[in-house]
Amino acid sequence: MALEAFKSSQPLTLGVELELQVLDPTDYNLAPCAPDLIYWVGKQSAHSDRIVPEITQSMIEINTGVHSQHASLLEELRALRDHLHKGAGVLNVRLCGGGTHPFQDWPERRITDSPRHHKLSELYGYLAKQFTVFGQHIHVGCANGDDAMYLLHALGRYVPHFIALSASSPFVQGHDTLFQSARLNAIAAFPLSGRAPLVLTWREFEAYYEKMTATGVVASMKDFYWDIRPKPNYGTIEIRVCDTPLHVSHAADLAAYAQALCHYLLEQRPIEPIDDDYLVYSFNRFQACRFGLEGTMVDPRSRRHRRIADDIVETLTTLRPHAEAVAAESAHQALLRRAARGESDAEHCRTAFSEFRSPQELARWQARQWLV
Amino acid sequence: MIAGLSDFAQLDPASSLGLLLLLAIVCGELVQRWLRLPRLCGYVLAGLFVGPSGMAWLPAPLGSDLRPLLWLGLGLLLFELGSRVDLRWLRANPPVLLTSLTESALCFASIYILLRQFDFTPEAAYAIGAIAVATSPTVVIAVVIESRARGQVTQRLQLLSALNTLYSIGLLMLGEAVIESSTLSLNRLQNPLLLVCASFLAACMLAIAIGRWIPRLLEGEQARLLATLALVLLTAMLVQFYKLSLPLVFLGGGLLLRHFSERLRIFPDHFGGVGGLAALLLFALTGASLSFSDLTQGGVIALMIIATRVIAKYLGVICFAGRGGLSPAKAHCLGLALTPMSTIAVLQYHEQAGRTAALAEPMFGAAILASVLIMELLGPPLSSRAIARANEADANVGDGRHGA
């Protein structure tokens, strides 16, 4: 089967998909009320195409439109958040961010009633219910497929940044996992997770795709659970490693970081990706998931080890003119502050948990944070 | 052998209680496994077997030794239901309040009209209508916990049940004030008002004690749970001693706790298994206090009351469901889920019959008790099916896992 043509879209535009938790205010466990929320949204005139279901009924996803600037993206995220908040009030549920739910039990989750999700559940067994994790996907527009493939591989070096900056899932099943982002462990179990093969032109990628579909291993682009994935029908590359942050403002900041990075990479082409770059990929990725900003990342070329937070600060410093070029100065500042202080949503969760000593209180705190 | 058992059972209430509980547990399991009905139906059947219509091992008005257990069971379940209901939701979603008022009003009015057609006295028709307004909160909480239900129908069912139980109590108290005279006078209102205020006060104290003092004074879930249980038992005895309204105190207490408590999970779900025991006691003892003779006397009327009630509540829910954010499919489920009628009704009947001579006519008792008998067996399955149809029951329940 042939891959669809890469739709040319306005370069460096942004779109964000955010998966949110739907909570039952009786005990702040997950509530299977996403279908009811979507029904409610459908009956309002606003935003009905922006809010969609996910694999289990306690997950709801908001999709923004296409934005060229951080400010308008943040505005839409806030509008969607507030709209859903109204619906949540009507249905007596709560919404929150965070990469995992602090104490939910995967067997209790219910698969969304749609043919595609039932098929996934049949194919992947318990992995489908375990996939009740909540992430942020950032889309960056590309003019053509070749740019997309270049960015896909060039951004690989920065994957630990995105993981460490967004990490917000330290608790699973009521216990501290000691990870900053335990969410990505749920994705790792899928057979087609990991990274794309090192091809740098869209033509070569099409050839690869044909081989994969010819073997029958893959039916569509959606079957690849890579960290960064091209999306030809949108004309974007999609960064899929971020946890849903605790606040929408941070989600917008992360998207702006991706935008500035892509601006820098496309303009200056500082590295040409080679296969050896991926020698350290898994290690760096694990370090970011486990230790977050305090983790160690290795530069494959210079073989230097450095603290992820320091690498982020250095990158942000390099990115300053590019951030200005895409009007993302406030996002740039906010991220710089966080990285310099070693601040992360995961640590905020831990602090809150140590204060409340109850996973339910933590979930309730997350729900309050979401509205800030 | 049965004769021998009868002798043993009539020795003292404790032995008959032990037999009853064992029988109830077995019946509950059989009913769940073979008939796919909620366990509490089995408990009721066991109670019927042991009660006056069956083996008559337990005396017909339950002895003073056993009634505290009934109150403990009732108190725990009512308190748990109250604590799961957030009255603030009514502010965020006014159509739900409209739904509540509509279904109760329709139910009351239609039953009153029906019974007047059958030559019931206005007082009796009023009292039965008022009692019928309540959807059994104990059945609701037992079914919700057993099926581990979560979702919109479940939430609304709990809320509507709590509210219509309160309306029912209110209507009965109002009725008492006018029952002996044809006009509402301040004098007549005094007693019920005093009762309401005192019960409300007791509810507040219960909520504060469980919500604030226990967590502050005791560490550890076990200690807190035991203290909560002891407190509930003590409160139940006090309520009966001072003749307060048990449903008002415990349901109200739970509602107040939810409304004002900042911390969650002061006690575990279903009081960590003790709730299961409470349900067992409550439904088995309720079954033991019902009798088939009520059916023969009031069976026909009871069927009409039940049918009217089902239709009225169903229509009441459908009216505002859409505006309240409920999809049509779920609205149908909710309408049917409201049908249970139970222990509270029996309690209210006994209280009313005891208090007002005008209700001493036998048809009054027969109609109510027959309705309760039928609904004890039909209501829970209807609610349980409705929750399952709405896809809100946990699919894993009943597969032998812990807690299932």
Image (cartoon, rainbow, N blue to C red):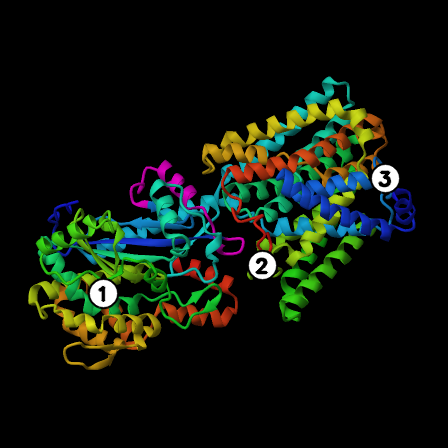
Task: Sort mark 3 into few (<14), some (14-19) or many (20+) by Cα contacts within 10 Å.
Answer: some
Judge the density around disc 1: few (<14), some (14-19), many (≥20) Cα neighbours within 10 Å. Answer: some
Q: Is residue B53 left or right of residue B144?
A: right
Outermost residue to the left = A268
Residue type highlighted by circle 3 = Met
Secondary structure under badge 1? helix
Specify few, some or many for label 2: CA neighbours under 10 Å numbering under 14, 14-19, or 20 or more.
some
- Label placed on residue A169: none
| Cα gap from disc 1 to disc 3, whole angstroms | 80 Å
Q: Chain of mark 2?
A: B
Q: Which residues are magenta?
A: A25-51
Residue topped by disc 3: B55
Distance in Å between CA atoms under marks 2 and 3: 47 Å
Q: Give me the disc on residue B261.
A: 2
Q: Is residue A92 above or below residue A269?
A: above
Q: Taking the image as drawn, is residue B242 in sight?
A: no
The CA span between labels 1 and 2 is: 39 Å
For disc 1, the marked residue is: A330
User: What is the chain identity of the residue bearing mark 1?
Assistant: A
Nearest to the observer: residue B380 or residue B122: B380
Q: Residue at x 46, y 44 (%)?
A: A91
Is A133 located above or below residue A83 in the figure? below
Q: Do callouts 1 and 2 point to residues on the same chain?
A: no
